[in-house]
Structures are given as structure tokens and as C-alpha cells.
Amino acid sequence: MKPKLEDVAQLAGVSPTTVSRVINNHGAISAKTRQAVQMAMDQLHYQPNSLARSLQGKATKLIGLIFYDISHPFFAELVSRLEGILFEKGYKTILCNSANNPDKERAYLKLLAANQVDGIIAGAHNEGIEEYQAYDLPIISFDRYLAAKIPIVSSDNAMGGRLAAEKLYLGGVRRPIIISGVETKKSPTNGRTTGFQAFFKQQAIDVQQYVIPFETTAQLRRERLANLLTTSVCDGVFCTDDLTAIQLHQVAQAHGIKVPDQLKIVGYDGTKFVRDYYPALTTVVQPLEEIANTLVALLQERIQDMQVPLKAQYQLPVVLHQGQTA
Amino acid sequence: MKPKLEDVAQLAGVSPTTVSRVINNHGAISAKTRQAVQMAMDQLHYQPNSLARSLQGKATKLIGLIFYDISHPFFAELVSRLEGILFEKGYKTILCNSANNPDKERAYLKLLAANQVDGIIAGAHNEGIEEYQAYDLPIISFDRYLAAKIPIVSSDNAMGGRLAAEKLYLGGVRRPIIISGVETKKSPTNGRTTGFQAFFKQQAIDVQQYVIPFETTAQLRRERLANLLTTSVCDGVFCTDDLTAIQLHQVAQAHGIKVPDQLKIVGYDGTKFVRDYYPALTTVVQPLEEIANTLVALLQERIQDMQVPLKAQYQLPVVLHQGQTA
DNA sequence: TTGAAAGCGCTAACAC
DNA sequence: GTGTTAGCGCTTTCAA
């Protein structure tokens, strides 16, 4: 079996307390004893049991990450960055894909609480998970409204919408379309739409809105986009996520529509992946590094002091990546 | 503070043991008591503390996943699938990106052991992490050689290489190139190269091999590919991963090279993502679902019985996805 | 500077 | 059916 504190103590000829002291660097220990203990630990390949340690009320150094699905490149990059930052700070990451499954999300929330995680960062898509308030845990949200007292970090969605609108308008677009996911009442992402529409309203131009649910399969989405292109008169489209924008670009090309001459396209997200492998796409770039840093920083504040006052919203600036689609 | 077993017991007017019994459905309990306990639990929003439970030697239901980086679409999809399967089986997933950082990988291994994970699934790229043998933990590897007794699950790399070669040869390729990552001695992925070369050898055709390290940045890789295209005479390329293949395709197009007429390209991996968003790419598809299922199934066997005899290798069949690049 | 003893929240004999 | 008791591996008073 794995060696325990007592085994080390015995080998070093001291009490368990003393061993615990050198591990935690607690109190005063003679250099001699310290060394003896160190040797015993090395010899036994001793590994303190985090479980036992956390049972005394010590932090578990476990953080739960609840997002839609990391097979989506945006969340893959966000989660990857979060994992990196958390690791640096001594935290372990529990990965929770919530998909479109509220039950799974609830189950995970329960599991995380049962496992005494120190905190949670969540940005899932399911609506009406009341449990977020119930557990008295440090939680920070990304780009979603979860509950009254949970701070939201997001990119400046409204500014992003506006940037997209400006880009299209200055490129000559006068019959704009926006393709978004389903918009729910308190969702911060609605800003992308409102920002976009607000700009065109100033120019006295109407914006048509098409809704394609986020979780729509790629194939179905492709069909809907093809349908849209053949039935609508438009010269510019703002897709509120890059994957839709990429598909639209492909569908347009397949239909012999010249991009950006006949049709301009702007996306949203601008992950490193898309910029690397689909650089042609003009898109609004979310500052993922800053977002990840902010999420972790706020979470740490909350962990340190559950009562610390935090703003309800933290909006981080976006920029436009100039590709060849607009 | 959070309610504990004893609080529930008190409220229900029974002993802690009894509460524990109804939670674990252990032994015989009168319907009346069970109900009383249930009510008390509900009333207190009681959540058993997994830490305390696991301290008795119970499983933690924690699994560590160590891979290169989930911001790479292949690992994103694999990890996403693993997470899904593990969740179904009641496991929580600890995410560990090892990047190209052996120290991080070692640190994670240590952390996972300290946290008493039930098992580990690893497929990182770092060489010479001896620790994998040291910890006496259930471990299954994906597509990498980790240590003598750790089973490896992988796609049938040699067959994949062969399929790619056949495809190119039948398409008329007579001056083939293979672009792979750095090949280390015991790596299963070498099979892609050997399978590819073996086929062409039968046709008495030489294969040129180019090596581009897996972790090369997208930009640098692009430059190297451009360089390759301008300096080599070739009519067909097998890239041992899709991202390289996609870049090569883009670079070729930028150079006015007609694909597949003048140059044929076959990739490797065939994730859902690539098939959805870059369907033009002809590529060897790894059976990710089967791989994920196998990894978890084997791990469970090992967890149940550390001594269970497992094969050293499990190779899963690949298929060719027909795109327009070959 | 060190040790003995109590206890974190839970489960598992062993009684009754 | 139910309760008592003794730990799981560690940290932390409190004494010495």
C-alpha cells in the first residue's frame, strides 16, 4: 500500500506531528530532524494524501469548469487557457461539458459541490439552472447570466456588434443580415445583435435577423444557410459565431457567390485556431487571454473572501481581424 | 457551514450510521426510518462529502486525462468523448494539458496520485517520463509508448499509412512525400510512416520524408510547407495529421498549384470537426468513438483488478474519408 | 523543538 | 433494524 505519514515518521524516528510539520513548513524544526524526515520521505516515495488533508478544511485546490463542449474550438481554447492559468496557481481542473443537457449540468454542479471544489467557472448554455444560487460556492460566469450575485465576464458584445456593422457598412453593405443563436432574456450575448442593429438604425437601414440555434448540427446548419442564400436578398452578413461564418462562406462559394464582392461576411470569436487555419475570415476577436485571466482573478478573490464585492459585469474589449471576407 | 451526516441524523432522530445506511442503500432499513432520513436530508440540502467518503478507501471516481493540449481539435474531440463516457459511468474528469512540458506532465502525475485518482488515461507527447511506472496506478495510454506494462490503444497506424499510399498511388502519384512529426523510437505513430513506405516500396517507388515537429507554430509550419513546395518535385503528399494537410492545401492553392490535379494530399485524423468544416480534405479517419470506448473499458478493467492481463496493444481500424484533395 | 491526543466527515465491523 | 465504536490519513491544539 501507499506509505502514510506514520510510515515516514517511524522510518525517521520521529512523531507523525513532526513529519506533518516539515511537510507544511510549520513551526520550528531542527535542521537535523528536517533532513531525517526528508530522507525518509524520499526513500518511501511518500505522497501526502490530499483527501485527508482537505478533510481538515484545507482547500482542495480543485476548480470546476462548466462549458458547453470543448470539442467546439472556442471553448477548447478558453478551457485550455484556463487550465494553464489554474495550473500555474496550483489548481487542478475538473472538466464538465454541459452540452445541451440541463440534467447533466445539474448533476455536475452537485458533484462539484460534493467534491468540495474551491470554486467554479461556468459558461454553459442551459437555461434556468437555479442550483447556481443554491450552492454557496465561489462562482464566476463567462458570457452567461447564471444568477443574481454571480459576476459575468464577457467580451464587449455590443462593441463587437457595432464593429461588425461598421465594417460592413463602410464596405457598402445596405441590406444586412444578422445570424444569431436563440436569444434568451438576460443573455449578455444579445449585445452582439443589439450593437449591430443600433449602428444600422442610425443609418436608417433595417437589419434582417435569422436565428439558428447554437447546437444545430453542422450539416443542418449548412442546409439552412444554403436556404437563406437562395431566398434572401442581401449583401452582407454578420454571424455571431465563427463556425457559422465559415460555413456561410463555404456555402456562398459553392453557390458561385463572390465573397466579398457580392457578399460580405463577418464572424465573431476569432480564436487562434480560426485565425491560423481560416485566416480569410474577417471576424470580431474576443480577447481570450484577458478573459481567462479575468475569470481566474475574480474567482480567486471570491475564494479568498466570499463576501468581496464584485461588479455584476466585466466587459473586455474586442478588435476586428481583417480577413478577406469583408 | 455545510450540514454533515450527524446533523441529518439528529434532525431525523436516528444515529449517523443509519443515515449512512440509507445514503449507501446498505443493509435493511424500515421504510419509516428511510423516509424520515430522506426528509431530513432534503430539508438540510445535505450533500455527502466525497472527501471523507473516499478517505475510507472508497473510490474517488476521479480520472486524470493527460494529453497534449485540448486546443488541438483532435485532442479536443477525444477528450470530449472521454468526458462523456466517463460521466455516464459516474467518473469525474481531471483535465491535464501536458503541452510540450515534461515538468508539467510530471507535476500532474504527482498531483493525480496525491488526489487518489482511480486511474489515468494519457497520450501526451513528452518523452522519457519514467514516473508512469513508479506510481502504482491503473493507466491506459493512447497512441504513445509510456512504459512496459501500460497498454496502448491506437488507430491502426500502419493500415492508415497503407490506405493513404494506395489512394495516392491509384490516383497516379509516383513521386510521393510523407510529412510526419519527429519519430521517436517506440512510438506507435511511426506505423503511419512505415505503412506508407512499405506500400510504395512494393511498387519500387521511393518516398521522401519531411519532418515537421508536431508543436511547430502554425505560421512557421506554413513557411516550411511553402518552402517544401517550391523546392521539391512531387505529385502527392501524405501528412500524418490533418492540420498540416489543411495548411499544405492552402499553401498549394496560394501558389497556384491545382489540387488534386497537380498535387494530391491525404491527411490523418479525420475528426468530426475537420469533416464538418473542411470536408474537402481526403483523410484517414481514426475511429474516435471506438478509441474512447476502448480506453475507458480497459481502464475500468484495470481499476477493478490491477492484475488483470491486458494486451500490450489494441489497434482499431481506420477508414479513408474521400474528399477532393486526392 | 517535539509529541500525545483529539477530530475533520464518513463508513464498517460488531454488537444488541 | 438500529446504535456503538473504531478508524481512514492528516492537521492542530495543547503540553512538555
Image (cartoon, coloured by chain):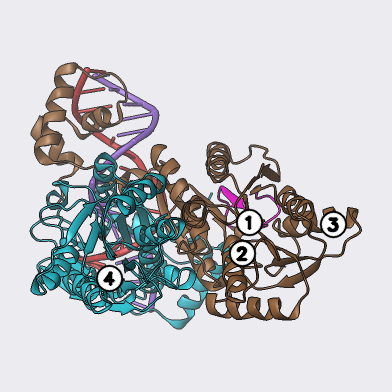
Chain colours: A cyan, B brown, C purple, D red
| CB under 8 Å between discs 1 and 2 | yes
Is the Cβ of the residue at disc 2 closer than 8 Å to that at disc 3? no
Q: Secondary structure at mark 1?
A: strand
- On whether disc 3 and disc 4 are found on a single subunit, the reply is no
State how far apart marks 4 and 2 are (Cα).
36 Å
The numbered mark, 1 or 2, whose residue comes first in the sequence reads 2
User: Mark 3, chain letter?
Assistant: B
Q: Which residues are magenta?
A: B135-151
What chain does badge 1 belong to? B
Q: Which residue is mark 3?
A: B200
Spatial separation of the CA atoms under disc 3 and disc 4 = 52 Å
On screen, A319 above or below A15?
Answer: below
Residue A153 horizontal/vertical position (percent) = 20, 68
> What kind of element bears circle 4?
helix
Let me know if marks 1 and 3 both belong to one chain: yes
Marker disc for residue A296? 4
Callout 2: helix, strand or loop?
A: helix
Name which quarter of the figure residue B183 lies in: bottom right
Q: Residue beneath label 2, please?
A: B245
- Residue B23 percent location from the top left of the image: 26, 31
- Decide which of tag 1 and tag 3 comes sooner along the chain: 3
Up the image or down, B81 lies above or below A316; here it is above
Mark 1 against mark 2, which lies toward the viewer?
2
User: Are there few (<14), some (14-19), or many (20+) residues within 10 Å of tag 1?
Assistant: many
Three-letter amino acid code at disc 4? Val
Q: CA distance from mark 2 to mark 3?
A: 20 Å
Q: Nearer the viewer, mark 3 or mark 4?
A: 3
